Amino acid sequence: MIRHLFIINPEAGVKSCVAEATERIKRAFILNTDRRNETYDILLTEKKGDATDFVRQACLENPGFTRIYACGGDGTLHEVIAGAVGAKDIAIGVVPVGSGNDFVRYFEDVLPRERFLDVSACVRGDTVPCDVMRCGEIYSLNNISAGLDAVTGRRQQIVKRIPLVSGGAAYKLALGYSFLSSMYHPMRFVIDGEEVTIGKGAVTLAVVGNGRFYGGGFKATPLADISDGLLDFVTIPALSQLQFLKYVSDYKNGRHLETVPNLYFKRVKKIQFLAEKPISLQADGEIFTVKDPEIEVVPAAIRLILPKEK
């Protein structure tokens, strides 16, 4: 018997998503006779880290196959992945009822967000292998970044508390504020064992991507592949505010690989960021401070549930 576990983050989105998500889940099972021999549970998070604990507990208690769904935003999915990496007989799905939901944009050409919101399509969906990024004890499904993006991510968490400000709008507001501060972040890199200095040793931002989008729709790593066993590393050397304004539209739409001068792009298995002080990192919208962080790919670390196509 297959057990389905839905983990809902009540704080995701502009308003509480509990009622909407619960209704979608019940409809998928009650109205679908094919699902009557399968069980499902709904758990609500109350604090940071709950989703990770729920997944780990489910892995211990359930001897059979469990399908676990992150019902929230990218932060909820981030916590679910942290609990699922290394577990056997577990598959992870996404019900994107949060405000940003950048990871599912990866599939936008074949599976629009509405299909992920169709819980019935999700529970009937097949699974595909998916890589994960590891930075020490931090696991990330989508991307990890430093520089302007991490500064912006930290400020985004504050801006999101403003009523009616969604993930995309919050990111843009935070980015505008960060634009007025330093665009210069001294940093070196060790890429697959080789030390590399980019530009004059300082960058405006550096992104390591498994997925393609972040920050409410910025296509930072437009060529990334979630199942190729590699990570896309994109670094933009230090820019002035005027230079940044010139290229920000390209960065949002994924054209920057061709237009931004001196941009560095490479597919890697492992990369380390080096700086004199601990570095602020953004990982799936969560902010961490790490000294000389090392990021590596964990190939096919999870099974990802994709909703059934119509």
Image (cartoon, rainbow, N blue to C red):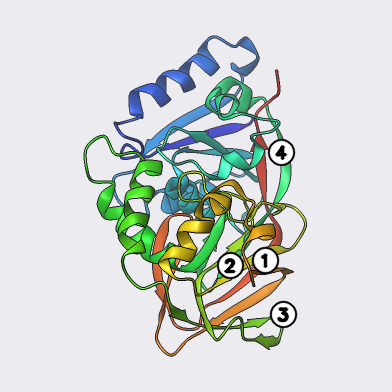
Q: Quadrant of residue 42?
A: top left
Mark found first going from the N terminus, 1 or 3 = 3
**Quadrant location of the C terminus in the rendered image:** top right
Label for residue 134? 2
Provide the secondary structure element on which disc 4 rests.
strand
Provide the secondary structure element on which disc 1 rests.
strand
What's under tag 2, amino acid-wise? Arg
The one nearer the camera, 80 or 206, is 206
Label for residue 127? 4
Q: Is residue 228 left or right of residue 45?
A: right
Q: Above or below — where is 33 with respect to 1?
A: above
What's under tag 1, amino acid-wise? Val
Q: CA distance from mark 1 to mark 3?
A: 11 Å
- Tell me the crowding category of disc 4: few under 14, some 14 to 19, or many 20 or more residues within 10 angstroms, Cα based: some
Q: Does the image show residue 47? A: yes
Q: Quadrant of residue 87?
A: bottom right
Residues at discs 2 and 1 in contact (Cβ within 8 Å): yes
Q: What residue did someone put label 1 on? A: 297
Mark found first going from the N terminus, 3 or 4 = 4
Q: Is residue 232 left or right of residue 160?
A: right
Residue in the image at 51% along x and 57% along y: 246
Q: Nearer the viewer, mark 4 or mark 2?
A: 2
Residue in the image at 51% along x and 12% along y: 30
Mark found first going from the N terminus, 2 or 3 = 2
Q: CA distance from mark 4 to mark 2?
A: 21 Å
Q: Nearer the viewer, mark 4 or mark 1?
A: 1
